[in-house]
């Protein structure tokens, strides 16, 4: 009689591997921070790294893909309103936490940065596809969100922090710096597409390593500066606990409000999925380099902490939601009465 074989069940950690690498870089900076001439050289290198990142974003963003779903204007207006109006308003509503001593001004600045950032591109589209949502509309909304976020995010952050007394209003010098480090490289990338688009398409894996590696370098630099300046002595476990609660409240509120808005406005299920995933998520890839431009070097480490925690939380929650959406009956992808946005062919899943 053959012996019975037993296999232990395999489990996957519900943690994004890239987030683990980011945590590892932060831990390395805590033990071996960059100092002196090394830190100065790293600071100069980061400026070029950020320019390279936004050049790559511009070179890889196809204008045709960005505008493919532009006719679905009702959906896009809802997503953009959620991303750049509702989210910042929720962040502004959290300002009393600073007065109550629950959030430091530096961490609150990070929360505002989080609330003002554009939506993710890759994960928003991926979750929409898994959930059998309107992928074409997700591509358009997420891509255009990342584009206009280069302009809107710094303005929103500056206005809110100035009004709340937590930081200065963006000056002409700041606008010039943001333009040179973010918008000009992005525009150069767009203009280079006739020459670089095919090569970029062939080297997608290599370029993925480049931009992810660049972000890791930004994290190491930011956390090194925080260690050298002594800023990390200002944060404790209670601060992290408050941030986790704030992030959970923000994510829960946005998921609920985007779902409610999509249903009240008569969107069918596939469009609802796109609105929920594109309107409730924030881009870590855009937020980290933007933080180095918007905040003083010694403050960047604390300012990006809310975003890093939120990023992992949104991945875990949205992954579970996408799987749940995907289990719905096929007939749920149909149109709802009175909705002119759900025409055949606009809600096909990838």
Image (cartoon, rainbow, N blue to C red):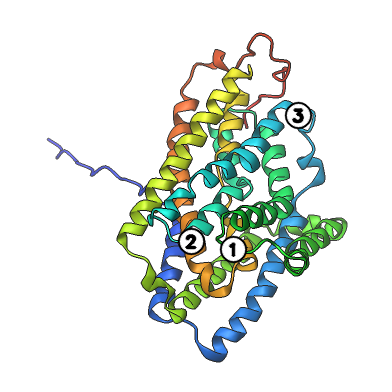
Which x, y percent locates residue 52?
71, 67
Which x, y percent locates residue 37?
57, 91
Asked if the residue at tag 2 contacts the one at tag 1, i.e. Cβ–Cβ closer than 8 Å, the answer is: yes
Q: Nearer the viewer, residue 219 or 247?
A: 247
Label 1, on which residue?
A: 167
Tell me the quarter of the image containing the C terminus: top right
For the point 66% across and 36% down, which residue is it?
81
Total labels: the figure holds: 3
Q: Callout 3: 10 Å neighbours few (<14), some, many (20+)?
A: few
Which x, y percent locates residue 319?
46, 38
Q: Residue furthest left?
A: 1
Q: Earlier in the sequence, mark 2 or mark 3?
A: 3
Q: Callout 2: 10 Å neighbours few (<14), some, many (20+)?
A: many
Q: Nearer the viewer, residue 285 or 225?
A: 225
Camera-nearest label, 3 or 1: 1
Residue 100 visible to an observer of this rendering: yes
For the point 61% across and 79% down, which residue is it?
43
Relative vertical location of residue 272 with respect to residue 184 in this rendering, above or below = above
For the point 15% across and 38% down, which residue is it?
2
Would you identify the image quadrant in which residue 348 lies?
Answer: top right
Q: Nearer the viewer, residue 329 or 33?
A: 33
Instruction: Please tell me whether mark 1 sits on a helix, a strand or a loop.
Output: loop
Label 3, on which residue?
A: 73
Relative vertical location of residue 44 with respect to residue 234 in this rendering, above or below = below
Instruction: Please tell me whether mark 2 sits on a helix, a strand or a loop.
Output: helix
């Amino acid at each position: 009689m053959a012996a019975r074989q037993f296999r232990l069940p395999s489990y996957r950690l519900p943690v994004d591997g890239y987030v683990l690498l980011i945590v590892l870089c932060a831990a390395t900076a805590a033990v071996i921070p960059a100092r002196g001439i090394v830190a100065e050289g790293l600071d100069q290198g980061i400026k070029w790294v950020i320019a390279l990142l936004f050049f790559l974003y511009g070179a890889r963003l196809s204008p045709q893909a960005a505008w493919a779903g532009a006719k679905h204007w009702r959906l896009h207006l809802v997503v953009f309103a959620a991303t750049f109006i509702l989210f910042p308003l929720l962040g502004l509503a959290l300002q009393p936490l600073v007065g109550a001593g629950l959030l430091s001004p530096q961490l609150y600045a990070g929360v505002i940065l989080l609330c003002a950032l554009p939506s993710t591109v890759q994960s928003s589209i991926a979750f929409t596809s898994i959930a059998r949502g309107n992928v074409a509309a997700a591509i358009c909304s997420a891509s255009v969100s990342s584009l206009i976020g280069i302009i809107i995010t710094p303005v929103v952050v500056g206005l809110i922090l100035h009004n709340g007394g937590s930081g200065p209003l963006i000056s002409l010098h700041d606008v010039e710096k943001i333009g040179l480090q973010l918008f000009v490289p992005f525009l150069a990338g767009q203009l280079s597409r006739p020459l670089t688009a095919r090569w970029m398409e062939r080297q997608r894996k290599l370029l993925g390593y480049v931009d992810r590696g660049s972000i890791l370098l930004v994290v190491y630099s930011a956390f090194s500066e925080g260690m050298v300046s002594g800023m990390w002595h200002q944060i404790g476990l209670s601060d992290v606990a408050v941030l986790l609660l704030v992030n959970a409240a923000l994510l829960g509120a946005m998921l609920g409000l985007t779902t409610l808005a999509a249903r009240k406005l008569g969107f069918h299920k596939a469009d609802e999925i796109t609105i929920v995933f594109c309107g409730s998520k924030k881009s870590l890839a855009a937020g980290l380099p933007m933080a180095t431009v918007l905040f003083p070097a010694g403050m960047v480490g604390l300012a990006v902490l809310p975003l890093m925690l939120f990023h992992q939380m949104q991945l875990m929650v949205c992954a579970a939601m996408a799987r749940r959406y995907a289990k719905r009956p096929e007939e749920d992808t149909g149109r709802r009465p009175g909705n002119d946005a759900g025409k055949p062919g606009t809600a096909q899943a990838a």
